[in-house]
Amino acid sequence: MIEHFFKPSNTDQALNLMKEHGSNATWFAGGSKLNARPSLTKKTVAISLHNLALESIELRGNSLYIGAMCRVQSVLDHELTPYGLKQAAQFIYSKHLRNQATIGGEIAAFQEEALLLPVLIALKTRIVTAEVGEMNIEDYLESASRGLILQVVIPDVNLVCLAYNLTRSAAGLSIINAAVSLDQAGESVIAIDGVSPRRAGYSIPVRLRDIEAQKLTEEQLEKAVANSVFPEADIRGSVDYKQYISGILVTDLFAECQRLVKEA
């Protein structure tokens, strides 16, 4: 339970507070994860990010810079947000949650369902942290101690990217969450969540790099994806079902990306 709440006025103060309180402290962004089960925090000190001016969305060339404190609903509503990211933002079914949750918090939190992460990986997202500066989102997610996110950078807002989250109902658990991007040179990124064993209860999407490097027909792609993922059987579905549906979803997304690239 949170017993102490600090509101630093700048990044240096925030980092000093985190250093002072160490393992007892947590960053406080929108609070959608810290105050609700199953992610209810056990930390006793909350360090708020509300005064750090991290809510801008700015286009620099073809790159989109999104402040870590931007609400998911604001990202969804913004005219500059890539279509694939808009799709993924709506995977958070409740508008109330989208108005509370921040994009930085959705990336930094150790969650059972990583609803924004596949599409952010497919968009080749870069993360700017207070501790180390800019880094690839995949490297950030692999870090055991995720640093303070300041900005989320989409390198190319024109990259064709699509996402799909398979559930049994609007508020149901995610079964398979897949995203695919494709550029004009034919280079693709394929990211899927829900197809690998969870690490200490939280999820990190899988990127299918070996398949990305191959030129496959739709039938070959479907089989290759199904054979490259290793899900666990649970209430959401069997291993065979998850492998099968992963192949279907990725193939459909890839085919639609190809069509959009040709029309661009």
Image (tube, grey):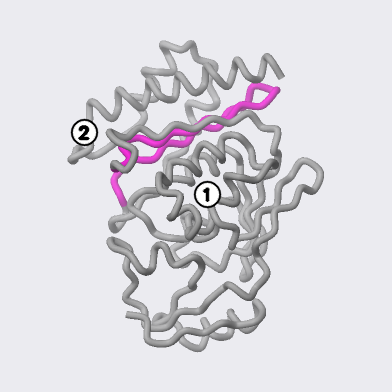
**The quarter of the displayed image where residue 22 is located:** bottom left
Percent coordinates x, y for residue 13 in the rendering? 62, 84
Left/right of residue 107 with respect to residue 240 in the rendered view: right
Q: Amino acid at mark 2?
A: Gly
Seen in the picture, residue 247 relative to 189 is either above or below; the reply is above
Quadrant into which the N terminus falls: bottom left
Range shown magenta: 173-198
Q: Is residue 241 found inside the magenta-colored segment of the image?
A: no
Percent coordinates x, y for residue 60 in the rendering? 79, 48
The residue that mark 1 highlights is: 138
Tell me the number on the disc at residue 237.
Answer: 2
Q: Secondary structure at mark 1?
A: helix
Percent coordinates x, y for residue 144 in the rendering? 43, 63
Percent coordinates x, y for residue 124 in the rendering? 61, 42
Seen in the picture, residue 33 relative to 44 is either above or below; the reply is above
Tag 1 and tag 2, C-beta contact below 8 Å: no
**The quarter of the displayed image where residue 236 is located:** top left
Query: Could you tell me how many numbered marks the image carries?
Result: 2
The residue drawn where x is 27% and y is 33% is 168
The residue drawn where x is 63% and y is 19% is 260
